[in-house]
């Protein structure tokens, strides 16, 4: 089991727009293709920070799901342009995490 902690910087003043895109379009699309989204968060004291966590059973599964999502026509045509408009992509921080024995997330 592995997790991704994905931290995004949203264009100033556009976080609510990004949350709507995530909740109405991106999360449902990725979930429909088998991705497990553990959580979606905004920072209480940082108006331009959005964080979400995804879980994968294995590295092979992660590779398959990345392919299904990011190589799809729907992603390339509809969702990637929205992400490019709303995010400061160069400031993304994606951290791969492995749960410890005491973790409730497994």
Image (cartoon, grey):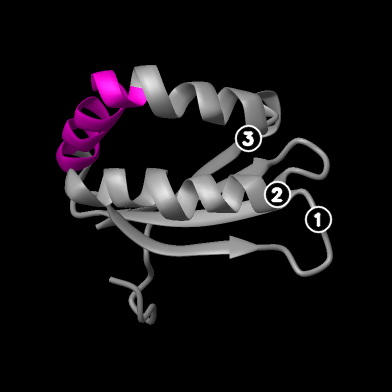
Query: Pointers 2 and 3 in contact (CB under 8 A)?
Result: no
Q: Is residue 23 magenta?
A: no
The 10 Å Cα crowd at callout 1, few under 14, some 14 to 19, many 20 or more, is some
Q: Reply above or below: 35 against 98.
A: above
Q: Which residue is mark 3?
A: 92
Q: Which residues are magenta?
A: 60-75
| Along the line of sight, the residue nearer the viewer: 59 or 50 | 50
Mark 3 and mark 1 residues within 8 Å of each other at the beta carbon: no
Q: Are marks 1 and 2 in contact (CB under 8 Å)?
A: yes
Q: Position of residue 22 (x, y in %)?
A: 48, 48
Report how far apart the C-alphas of labels 3 and 1 lie in the structure. 15 Å
Q: Which part of the image, by quadrant, shows the C terminus? A: bottom left
Q: Position of residue 24 (x, y in %)?
A: 42, 52
Task: Give the mark nearest the N terminus, 2 or 3.
Answer: 2
Residue 62 pos. (x, y %): 24, 39
The label shown at residue 15 is 2
For image coordinates 34% across by 26% down, the residue present is 75
User: Which quadrant is home to the N terminus?
Assistant: bottom left
Question: Mark 1 highlights which residue?
Answer: 47
Q: Front-most of 66 and 76?
A: 76
Residue 43, image x, y percentages: 72, 63
């Amino acid at each position: 089991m592995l997790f991704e902690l994905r931290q995004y910087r949203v264009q100033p003043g556009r976080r609510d727009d990004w949350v709507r895109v995530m909740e109405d379009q991106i999360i449902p699309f990725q979930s429909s293709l088998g991705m497990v989204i553990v959580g979606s968060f905004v920072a209480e004291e940082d108006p331009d920070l959005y964080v979400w966590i995804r879980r994968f059973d294995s590295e092979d599964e992660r590779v398959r799901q990345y392919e299904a999502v990011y190589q799809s026509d729907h992603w390339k045509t509809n969702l990637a342009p929205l992400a490019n408009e709303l995010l400061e992509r160069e400031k993304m921080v994606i951290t791969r995490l492995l749960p410890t024995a005491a973790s409730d997330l497994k």
